[in-house]
Image (cartoon, rainbow, N blue to C red):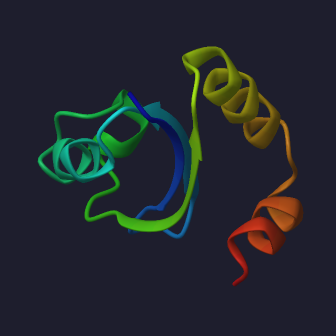
Amino acid sequence: MTHYVYVLECADGSLYTGYTTDVERRVAEHDAGEGAKYTRGRTPVSLVYTESFETRSDAMSREYAIKRLSRAEKEALVDY
């Protein structure tokens, strides 16, 4: 099973980072208001970045690292 870390751009311009094993399903959940509480009032969302990992642990570690980045660092990561 492949594990993914993804970054979404919300309708208000904010960036949201998450973890999943199925990126398409998870983005659809966010758009339907069924995803994270943070994205519920910020739809529609756009997928702007993904990374894949072999283990859940590696993906969760990367998600944590991305969440600790500044806005400018996240923008550089997603290559705005």
Answer with left or right where residue 10 lies relative to residue 70: left
Percent coordinates x, y for residue 72 in the rendering: 86, 67
Percent coordinates x, y for residue 74 in the rendering: 77, 60
Percent coordinates x, y for residue 36 in the rendering: 35, 31
**Depth order, front residue of 79/58:** 58
The quadrant holding residue 55 is top right
Q: Is residue 3 above or below residue 56?
A: below
Number of residue marks? 0
Answer with left or right where residue 25 lies relative to residue 59: left
**Depth order, front residue of 15/48:** 48
Q: Residue at x 78, y 66 (%)?
A: 77
Q: Residue at x 30, y 47 (%)?
A: 41
Percent coordinates x, y for residue 30 in the rendering: 25, 45
Q: Is residue 54 above or below residue 42?
A: above
Answer with left or right where residue 72 lies relative to residue 12: right
**Depth order, front residue of 76/3:** 3
Q: Residue at x 52, y 49 (%)?
A: 6
**Depth order, front residue of 42/79:** 79
Which residue extends farthest bottom?
80
The C terminus is located in which quarter?
A: bottom right
Which residue extends farthest top?
57
The N terminus is located in which quarter?
A: top left
Answer with left or right where residue 37 lies relative to residue 9: left
